Image (cartoon, coloured by chain):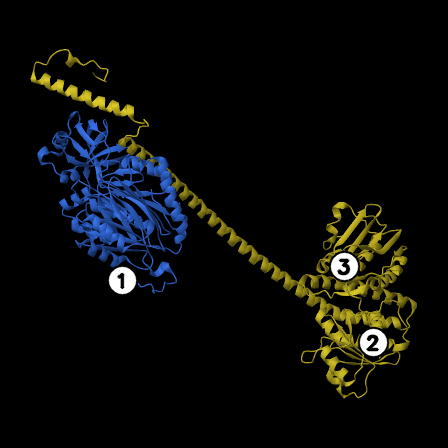
Chain colours: A blue, B yellow
Amino acid sequence: MLDASPNDIAPLSPYREVKPVRTAWSLHRDPQLAVRELADGLQHAHLGAVLFFCSTEYPLDALGHALDETFPHVPVSGCTTAGEITPTGYGRGCVVAIGFDRRFFTVAPTLIADLESFDLLRAQCLVDKLLGECRRQSTVSASDHSFALTLLDGLSSSEEQVLATLDAALGNIPSFGGSAGDDNRLAHTYVYHRGHFHSQAAVVVMITTPLPFEVFSTHHLRPCAEKLVVTAADRHQRTVHELNAAPAAGEYARLVGREVARLSEADFAQYPLAVRIGERFYARSIQRIHADGSLTFYCAVENGIVLTAMRPTPILADLEQVLTELESRLGPPTLIIGCDCFLRRLAIEALGEAQSASELLRRWRAIGFNTYGEQHHGMHINQTFTGVAIGHPRPDAADGANHGA
Amino acid sequence: MSLLAIPDPTQQMAPTTAREQALVDENRRLRKVCAALIERVESSGAAEGAPYAAFEHAVLLAEQVRERTETLHHTLDELGQVNAQLREEIHNRASAEQRLIEAKQEAEAANLSKTRFLAAVSHDLLQPLNAARLFASALGEHRVPEDARHLVEHLGRSLKDVETLLGTLVDISRLDAGVLKADVAPFEAADLLDMLAHEYQQIAASQGLALHYVRSDAVIDSDLQLLARVVRNFLTNAIRYTARGHVLLGCRRRAGGLEICVGDTGPGIPEDQRKAIFLEFRRAENRRDDQDRGLGLGLAIVDRITSMLDHPVGLASRPGRGSLFSVLVPYAHRPAGKRVQAVTEAMPDDEPLSGRTIWVIDDDLAIREGMQALLGSWGCRVMAARGPGVLEGETASPDALIVDYHLDDGDPDGLETASRLHERWPGLPVLVITANHDAALKHRARMRGFGWLLKPVKPLRLKMQLLSLLERT
């Protein structure tokens, strides 16, 4: 086992010689062997918490059981994906994990088992509990040096309310996250907490660290002139029946220039729609087309909203630029936790840029997954790359944390 | 059932052509779009828990946070710039301060070198003056015609005045240069004040003033010589500025020490001049006469000495009624040591000195000759030598040795010379004469039982010291 000897002498200065995080991934189909491979990469005397993302191709009960047995004394959190971001770039059908060194991170996870009844009072209690745990264990001020990671069941259709409520309770603590995926099957997505996978649930992980970090979100879409008004919608099903008082699918097909029957996810990725609020555009990604000509979205829609047709710009150049800006503020990242919309990955693959994307993600030390929606400061958004960049320890690390907007 | 309050003409007649049908369809769609937009506009801002409203709310909140963060960053940037400017200003001020410190150090160094120069020049001036005083004094001992005697007396007084002025200048420069160190020891106030009272009673009487003296048996802790300078200055001033009436010398026992007071019935000092009179070359107006040759350095010296000794000075004055100067001297916690100094001023008999053999070692010919004349006039047999070498052949012990501390380069200093001769003839009375005010030297001389006399040598003092030393043998 690598670096797991308890006789390891702790170096005098943890800031110089120790990696604050370790990462591991496995392609093993067998859950036992996959988890064993993760443990080989992550286990050491100072392992404080594990965060993982896995394909729904795994037998989840067995995987959860193996994780629980292998890491009995550290909290393990995670979710299912629509593709993974591994230490080598994009992966599929695999499991990837991050091990946090407790000398650098205090990690407090919790489960929201019932999304429907999650109100402000519960949110406040939840945040207080997590912050309390971080305060007890961390050497730095928890309210100034923490961020929250949210993992939600991607098919629960409850993200907006849960996030808005949670964000109100989090106050100034930056938050980000992703909606769990299921390899584009759109059947069942799960979040993992304490040995079990849950649906219709969310995991919130509070992470406190003296390392500098910044939560960020970016997309590569720019607005076109065309506008579509939603004239009939079912807000609970996130379904739009009519656009511009015509069957939604037909109207969208007309915009894209295709026949309805030939529309695919690749088109949804290539020709997204977005709402404009203030000066900014927020993509509303289409999930599927129904036989009745209605469209279901990955996020909230409402009668009367105006959708703007968007066109993509070079996706990797945009990401590279954002990460470079982050680097200028934080220094080279020690880790980026990335929530990357699965439609972006579809677009990248359609453009034949998967290799370049993997290379870019590997170079920037990104670990994460492809989502059914991203979360940023209480907003549920689509077709973005949203995450946190964590810098290296600095001599003045205690005051070095940098919270981005 | 239309939300839009615009009459719909397509409701009134059925379309007849395909084009009309298309327009009717379009009208229907546009009305529906309008209705949806109206519904949306009217429901926005409602506090309902609908998913899209929650999203919109979150976006607006995030937007607010972003704006405020930007404002905050902008403010922080501005603060940073202001800080940078302040830092630069601090840096500029620090370097200006550094330049001022350097300039001050240069000025102080220049002042110190000026003071040293003054001390050195004064010393060189004192030597021939000292000789002149000795000559004049020796001349006074001769029988001269009456008119010549007046001239000799004037000569003596003039030399004495020059000596006093020069001595004052030297003292000021020494005080400023920090050369003069206090030699604090316990002594009885009466030891000092009896002597001063006696001395100044005569001076006061000569000016037609009465000096009242109130004795005290307190034991105080101070430098006797320096404190004597202070009280002398008070007394001199009191007599100088008082036309008639009396001068008082007395003490008050205060909690913090013995307050030595000198009062007068003079013109008093106006309030606005009371600070200024302690500065150099400042003198109160209303001087009693204009024969006075003081430079106005007296109180400046008082100020320096009392600062050095840490004795507070007091001044009370009522114009037209008089002034009261005082100095507060701490009580001693040890018994007073016995002082060698003679306290009487009366010129004693020459008798005990008559026929004594006295060696004088001084590298200055004028001093040797002056000493020879003065000591000779007291009936002494004098052997004067430039250095110790000349006297080495002598086998008989002299009755006393007077040696200048500063001898020619190459010769051992006066103390060393005296010590060697003292070894040869233990019990030989030795008097060391020097212009050096170093308290350590004085201490060394005392430790060996040598007498110690500062230049300029006053004949009376010289005689007193010699008599005192000879008495002890």
Identified by mark 2, the residue type is Leu
Q: Is residue B37 left or right of residue B436?
A: left
Check chain identity for marks 3 and 2: say if they share one: yes
Q: Position of residue B284 (x, y in %)?
A: 78, 50
User: Comparing marks 3 and 1, which lies closer to the viewer?
Assistant: 1
Q: How far is mark 3 from mark 2, CA to CA?
A: 31 Å
Report the disc number at residue B469.
2
Q: Is residue A13 left or right of residue A365?
A: right
Whether residue A364 is visible to the viewer of this picture, yes or no, is: no
The reply to whether callout 3 and callout 1 are in contact (CB within 8 Å) is no
Position above or below: B240 against B436: above
Quarter the C terminus of chain A occupies: top left
Q: How far is mark 3 from mark 1, CA to CA?
A: 82 Å
Q: Residues within 10 Å of mark 3 (few under 14, many from 20)?
A: many
Where is residue B223, by image quadrant? bottom right
Position above or below: B200 against A58: below
List the residue tagged with mark 1.
A2
List the residue tagged with mark 3.
B330
Position above or below: A376 against B150: above
Element class at badge 3: loop
